[in-house]
Amino acid sequence: MTRPPVIALFPEASFGAALNCVGIARELAARGAEPVFLCHPGFTGVFAEYGFREYHLQPEPAAAQGRGETYWQNFVNTHLAHFDLSPLNQLEAYVAPTWEAIVDTVIAVEDSLEALLNQIQPDAILLDNVIMFPAILRSGKPWARVVSCAETEIPDPLVPPYLSGLSPEDAGGRAAWEKAAAAILKPAHNRYNAFRRARGLRPLPGGQFLENSDWLNLLLAPSAVRYERAQALPEELFVFLEGCVREEVPFDPPPLPVNDGPLVYMSFGSLGAIDTEQIGRMIEVFATLRARFYVNVGGFMDAYRRVPDNVFLGSWFPQPSVVAQSALFIHHGGNNSFCEALFHGVPSLVMPYCWDGHDNARRTQDTGVGRAMHRSDWSPDGLRATITGLLEDHALRARLKAISTRMKAEPGVRRAAEAVLERLSVAVETA
């Protein structure tokens, strides 16, 4: 190839996927490639801030406007009460409406995406999403599936169903989940398959919204928490990453009026920050503990009138840099957060509210790399005891330090970039 390969990265409209792709893109650029980003409405400027060219999708005028972060914040706010439900009961209340909204997005941006791919003519496409956009397959370009959600997204008889929050041993729960999911998700799945057929693609099996790539699949699944599989994934097509943690600007913790004790970082993601009532309850508990708490409250700073002297609220943090200095990371179970905690050897307290947060909360508990708690069904004494116990668990910290050492020996962003460029090189040589 006489010019740098152009790699188009297409993350879903969430900061977890977006920033995961930023980490990979930086490594691709360091190796001479030209990464560019396909950008959902509402994410304009996110990738440009890191120095990458953006190509902006335009939804159909009649379709839902602003299918970016603001849209999904409104969507989450509508479903806030449903996040206290069990994963099984969330199927009908939250998961099915979410899949319907995701299918809406695919349909809305299809023509725009096809036009952009024709304009860019990338050498490869990296799709970090939970659904296939037909324009990607129709482009005829090599594409990689990036699984930045939980490993459960790739099914296996020994791996719990995606989004179920189950342990591998829970056969009864699995049967109930699979029966309910097949019925509840069928309307969204049928509508999606109808759109695929209309675009000249084969339909997918029941419950499946995204096929594996025949070119490359990247899974953010650290070995310390990886599932045993009945059917091993072919190594030539599936590359497991020890997380995919990007480097961020350094974080110098602002001094607090009460600047004593270990640093605890809390973030429920840009969407989870909308639940200001729950975060406020937690802050009241933080005030009673000998620790420094740095709390990501997103765009909701005005919701907090009184802030304890040992608590700092911020609308944004360079998360990997903060986690690296933390003694405890309290989060919602997003896979990026889960992997960042492991990468830096930090215990997790996972308080999930939806999607794969339930799977990662269960995996945290099952593998002993932290604790899981219900997002709202807790007492102040119970939360206080859990935080104190994790901060004082020296054996856990020693184990996590060993996990961190293994992960840092093979950074996921580096392995991902190498895998993409290796396959591109093979494709060029055999063309």
Image: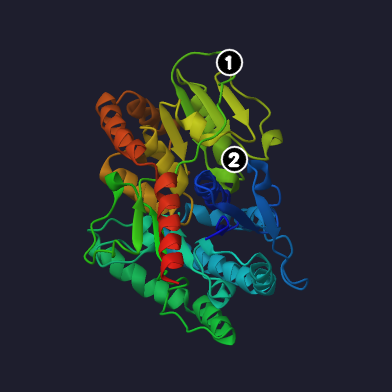
What is the basis of the colouring in this image? rainbow
Q: Residue at x 56, y 21 (%)?
A: 252
Picture layout, residue 336 above or below residue 315: below
Inspect this view and state whether residue 162 appears. no
* Inter-mark Cα distance, 1 to 2: 26 Å
Q: Which mark is residue 255?
A: 1
Q: Position of residue 226 (x, y in %)?
A: 29, 51
In terms of image quadrants, where is residue 119?
bottom right
Residue closest to the eye, 334 or 307? 334
Q: Would residue 114 appear left or right of 241 to someone viewing this image? A: right
Q: Mark 1 touching mark 2, by CB under 8 A?
A: no
Inspect this view and state whether residue 127 appears. yes
Q: Would residue 284 appear left or right of 42 to someone viewing this image? A: left
Label 1: state its secondary structure.
loop
Q: Would residue 170 appear left or right of 124 to someone viewing this image? A: left
Q: Position of residue 15 (x, y in %)?
A: 58, 49
Residue position marked by numbered label 2 in the rendering = 277
Q: Position of residue 423 (x, y in %)?
A: 41, 61
Instruction: Bin the neighbour count of mark 1 within 10 Å (Cα to Cα): few under 14, some 14-19, many 20 and up.
Output: few
In terms of image quadrants, where is residue 338?
top left
Q: Residue furthest right?
A: 61
Labels 1 and 2: the sequence-earlier one: 1
Instruction: Bin the neighbour count of mark 2 within 10 Å (Cα to Cα): few under 14, some 14-19, many 20 and up.
Output: few
Q: Residue at x 32, y 69 (%)?
A: 176
Label 2: state its secondary structure.
helix
Q: Residue at x 25, y 60 (%)?
A: 170
Picture layout, residue 211 above or below residue 263: below
